[in-house]
Every structure is written in C-alpha cells, then in structure tokens.
Amino acid sequence: MDKPIQVVIADDHPILLEGLRKLLEAEQDIAVVGQAFNGHEALEVTRRVEPSILLLDLAMPGLPGLEVLRALSASSLPTRTILLTASIERDDIVKALQLGARGLVLKESASQMLMKAMRMVMAGEYWIGRDSVSGLVETLRTQMFSPVEPKFGLTPRELEIVSSVTAGYSNREIAQRFSLSQETVKHHLTKIFSKLGVSNRLELALFAISQHLVER
C-alpha cells in the first residue's frame, strides 16, 4: 500500500477534535499523527511532525489560523494546509490562499467532502468549497491590479485565454468568444500550463493576478 496521508488536526474544541480524529482514523489511507488545541501548538506540532496535511481551525486561540499560515509559509515544510471554519469572509479566503493554504472546508460540510478535499489537495489541486474561481479572482484583481505586460513567453492569443480563464469563462465560452474549437482551447491551455508551471485553472488564475498578466 502507498504511504497513508499523515494528518495533524488543530482545533480548540476537544469534542470536535476527537470526533474528527475518529472519523479520519476510520479511513485506510489516512493516519492522524498529531493534534493541537491552539495556534502555537499547531505551529510547533506541524514543524516537528511535518505531516502531509494540517487541518487548521481558522479561529484558533493564542495564534489565529491566518498567522499560523503566515509562519508556515516562511518555512520549507511539505505540509499542505486545509482550513476548517464555521464561516469566512471572501477577503480572508484570498489572504489564506496568498499565505499558502491549499483548501478550505466549512465545518457544516459532510464528512465525505472533507475526505475528498484532502485527497484532491494531496493530488496537487486546490479545494475552496463551492466558491467560484472568478469570484476569488475579482477580489484579487481589486487588490493587486497592474497594467498587463507580455511575460513568460506567452503569445497574444495565450494571454487572451489566460485573461478569459481568470474572468471565469469555461472552455466552451472561450471557444465561442474567439471563434475557436474547444480542442484548440484545450491545446492552448496545455501550452500555457507548461510555460507557467501551473497544473489547473485556479493556479493559473492566481498566478496571472500575482504576476500582473491580466488587466482590469
């Protein structure tokens, strides 16, 4: 068998933490290797154990979840953080992504959604619940706007497609917008992913905003 997903759980509610531990330990491909009841413990345990995933309550006492993320982002740990929260503002989602979070799961979600989020994150994806990429990118655009400049060897057509993906258009909509076939759009996206070193549409959108590849 492949090595199980090693998980540290950080939550200040003992009953929730214990229930989550039992839930995860029932999965054959998941092993809980640590737990923490406040932000400082979460940081210490994560640095010491270096788990595959840190399940981090956003509202941790002592050191808030976003500050734990900030501290971890300055390290070279392989740990991927998924935030657990009862509710969150969109601006905080953006901050969390900018600080290195790989996922966010609402506590009201079904347990199957948490399991899926963990496995998607381990596969290199981002998990942000049901928030659309375009909504997140709109927030990033207002915070980090800069005029577009050709970069990274992208052609004018590739830049148009990057801008369309960032705006939330589907492959079908992009094809219609530029009178292309969907196969041609997929071909362009494959080349764009390769040039920019990203692996999915969310990573592409975040990269495009942070590197000023799109205009307002």
Image (cartoon, rainbow, N blue to C red):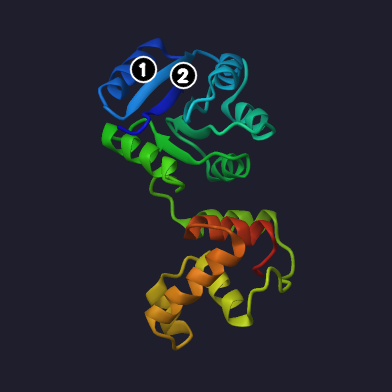
Q: Nearer the viewer, residue 145 or 158?
A: 158
Q: In the rendered image, which quarter contains the N terminus?
A: top left
- Quarter residue 50 falls in: top right
Dot 1: within a 10 Å radius of its alpha carbon, few (fewer than 14), some, or many (20 or more) residues? few
Amino acid type, callout 2: Asp
Q: Quadrant of residue 150?
A: bottom right
Which class describes the residues within 10 Å of circle 2: few (<14), some (14-19), or many (20+)? many
Of residues 9 and 139, the one drawn nearer to the viewer in this rendering: 9
Q: Is residue 182 left or right of residue 213?
A: left
**Percent x, y for residue 111?**
28, 32
| Residue marked by disc 1 | 16
Decide: is 195 above or below 40. Answer: below
Q: Is residue 52 above or below residue 94?
A: above
Q: Position of residue 103 (x, y in %)?
A: 47, 40
Tell me where residue 139 sits by quadrant.
bottom right
CB under 8 Å between callouts 1 and 2?
yes
Name the spot of residue 211 as percent of width and height, x first: 69, 60
Residue 7 horizontal side relative to residue 206, left or right: left
Which residue is located at x 53 percent, y 24 percent? Answer: 59
SS class, disc 2: loop
